[in-house]
Amino acid sequence: MLRYFLRIFLLAATAFTAAESLAQSQNALRGRDVPQNFEWESQKTSKFSYRLRSMDGKTRNYHVRVGDSFAPIEASTSRSLDTIFFSNSPLITFYKKSMDGKDSLYTPVMTVNMGSDKEDVVICLSERDGSILHRVIDISQKNLGAGVFAVVNLSKKPFGVAIGNKLLKVEPFETAKQSFPQSDDIEDVPLKFYTLGSRPKLSYERYISFIKSQNITFYVFDVPSDEDADGDVPFLMRYGKPPRKK
């Protein structure tokens, strides 16, 4: 009897896997890769731009549509925002590539809505229970304009930050910011980071010189500490303008 039920279970599992594979193949698109000399820089006249980060420690490789072809794209784990991608639509579908004989198949994995009013974002990907989740962080000049002092949490943990005298809790993939009246004056702004627990604990403190006619943004990958060696702090400081397409 046990063998009978086991056999039924295996047949059902095989049928389910076959049905799932069939559904995926039905959603897959036949196409071709962009030419080998393709560069993302050639797409910078597109309306939308974005960075792509993987938050689970694994580099992830996808393809996205560029015209009638598919371009490879990498979700990097590096602590950098230098790599930039472009799109003519705020809706970006990521595909996984496979081969069917000599034909290339591109199966959609997920579609991310950047938001039609955003020109520059960071797309963060994370995996939980086998599902790819994403969050979009607006780093456009519209959101981080002149006179703004901002801290962007690109880690998976909340932390506390004080910009001036205002203490804020910054959740993962969220932004804390304080706006100053725009002028050519230089403001020395105290910036403090706190680890959170039963009581917030000060971990890092600096005074940052800030020209209020421009902006400054800290992209934080982990809560910094005063023990961090100079040049090895776990954040990027961008001064003047957001890292947007030129």
Image (cartoon, helix red, strand yellow):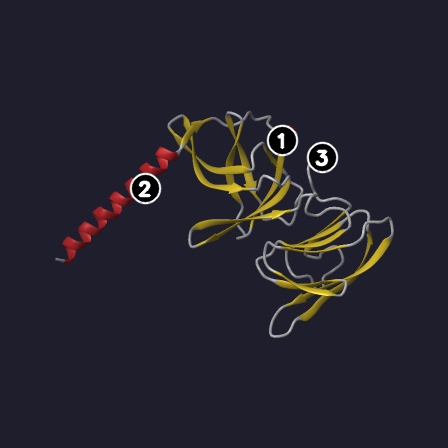
Q: Residues within 10 Å of mark 2 (few under 14, many from 20)?
A: few
The quadrant in which the N terminus is found is bottom left
In the picture, the disc for residue 20 is: 2
Q: Position of residue 138 (x, y in %)?
A: 63, 46
Q: Position of residue 152 (x, y in %)?
A: 66, 54
In this figure, which residue is indicated by the disc labeled 1? 46
Residue displayed at 60% across by 26% down? 37
Which mark is first along the chain, 1 or 2?
A: 2
Callout 1: helix, strand or loop?
A: loop
* Front position in the image: 217 or 103: 217
* Front position in the image: 55 or 86: 86
Q: Which numbered disc, 3 or 2, marks the residue closer to the eye?
A: 3
In the picture, the disc for residue 246 is: 3
Q: Which numbered disc, 2 or 1, marks the residue closer to the eye?
A: 1
Relative to 58, is 101 above or below? above
Q: In this rendering, does residue 226 appear at all?
A: no
Q: CA distance from mark 3 to mark 2?
A: 43 Å
The quadrant in which the C terminus is found is top right
Callout 3: helix, strand or loop?
A: loop
In the picture, the disc for residue 244 is: none
Which mark is first along the chain, 3 or 1?
A: 1
Which mark is first along the chain, 2 or 3?
A: 2
Q: Residues within 10 Å of mark 1 (few under 14, many from 20)?
A: some
Residue displayed at 70% across by 67% down? 203
Q: In this rendering, does residue 26 appear at all?
A: yes
